[in-house]
Image (cartoon, rainbow, N blue to C red):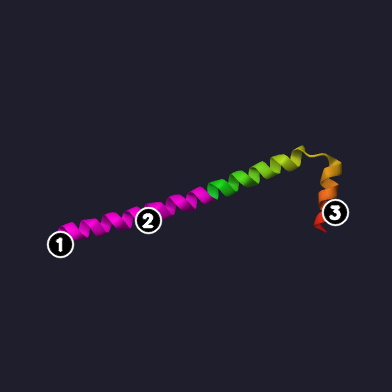
Amino acid sequence: MPTDFASTLVLIFTSALTFLVARLLSRKWREKRRHKEEAQRRAAESRQVRRARERRAK
């Protein structure tokens, strides 16, 4: 019986660890993609729009 409990405990621990690592990687990947899309959007905007945004930011 102790080996069954130990293996169950190891299974739960590794599952939780895998979940946390996957969640962290997913967040980083989404953040990186969001920054890339934002940079593309800003590169495509006109000079007038860019200056207006910079004035609002001040």
Q: Earlier in the sequence, mark 1 or mark 3?
A: 1
Quarter placement of the N terminus: bottom left
Q: Secondary structure at mark 1?
A: helix
Q: Residues within 10 Å of mark 3 (few under 14, many from 20)?
A: few
Describe residue 11's horizontal placement relative to residue 52 as left or right. left
The reply to whether the magenta stretch includes residue 6 is: yes
Q: Amino acid at mark 3?
A: Arg
* Residue drawn 85% across the image and 41% down it: 47
Q: Secondary structure at mark 2?
A: helix
Q: Amino acid at mark 2?
A: Leu
| Percent of width and height locating residue 10 | 26, 57
Labels 1 & 3 near each other (Cβ < 8 A): no
Mark 1–mark 3 Cα distance, whole angstroms, equals: 68 Å
Q: Residue furthest left?
A: 1
Labels 2 & 3 near each other (Cβ < 8 A): no
Q: Earlier in the sequence, mark 1 or mark 2?
A: 1
Q: Residues within 10 Å of mark 2 (few under 14, many from 20)?
A: few
Describe residue 14's horizontal placement relative to residue 20 as left or right. left
| Residue of label 2 | 17
Label ID, residue 55: 3
Magenta-tinted stretch: 1-27
| Percent of width and height locating residue 40 | 70, 40
| Residue of label 1 | 2
Q: Earlier in the sequence, mark 2 or mark 3?
A: 2
Q: Amino acid at mark 1?
A: Pro
